[in-house]
Amino acid sequence: MRTQTQTRTVGEQSLLFVGTFGYLTNRQLTKLLYAATSPNWETHLRYVQRILYSLVAAGFVVELPGRFVTMPHVYTLSGEGYSHISGVGMPKRRRIRPSEEQAKAHNLFFLVHTLAVTEVLIAAHLLSQTHPGIQLTRLYTERELKRKIFVTLPERTVCLEPDASLEFLLQEDVQDFFHLELYRNLPPVA
């Protein structure tokens, strides 16, 4: 019997993935769509690029061009895209302003950090697809969290602002929740 995700078109799956992860490159989207089923998932890159171009032309996705030649184009949902996927369980965002999204594309540090966090989230998603004993039950991006978590330690209270949070179900009986904080440049440890 086919599941609901198997009956969705590649365009619909692409919209759901862009909505779930927030910001994706065409390479990351191709990995999400084909890495679990095809060892040569990169051969599908041109097809996914055509799908993304059609979603941009339809107004469902906003393309954020890279600031430099070496930066990939990044895709995020438009307000119309969020409205379209709100019927399949995704919450509708309050407002999307394309000018604000375009401004984010010019912030190199934000974009590089966001794409690095997305790579970790994609790995967690693919882990749950390739190992049947591990299920990714919840995924929260920084956009959804937008809150501080206060942790009390013996000497002081520490404030965490995670980049993402993941909840896994292991062997169908152990539930584990992880907060993800990604640092790209740490000072050397002495």
Image: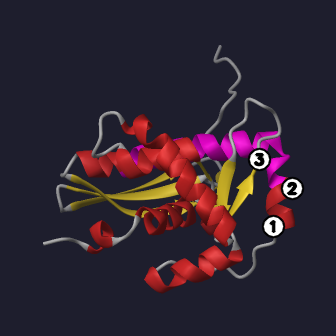
Q: Amino acid at mark 3?
A: Pro
Q: In the depicted view, which residue is nearer to us: 128 or 3?
A: 3
Which of pointers 1 and 2 indicates the residue nearer the eye?
1
Q: Is residue 137 magenta?
A: no
Q: Which span is picked out in magenta?
A: 104-125
Disc on res. 98? 1
Q: Earlier in the sequence, mark 1 or mark 2?
A: 1
Q: Which color scheme is applied?
A: secondary structure
Q: Amino acid at mark 1?
A: Pro
Query: Seen in the image, is 6 located left or right of residue 21?
Result: left
Circle 2 is placed at which residue position? 103
Q: Secondary structure at mark 2?
A: helix
Is 27 rendered above or below residue 134? above
- Give the side of residue 68 with respect to residue 161, left or right: right
Q: How far apart are the two marked residues, 1 and 3, measured between alpha carbons?
A: 13 Å
- Cβ atoms at labels 3 and 2 below 8 Å apart: no
Magenta span dominant secondary structure:
helix
- Which comes sooner in the sequence, label 3 or label 2? 3
- Label 2 packing within 10 angstroms: few (<14), some (14-19), many (20+): few
Please name the residue that numbered disc 3 is placed on: 65
What kind of element bears circle 3?
A: loop
Q: Position of residue 92 (x, y in %)?
A: 60, 82
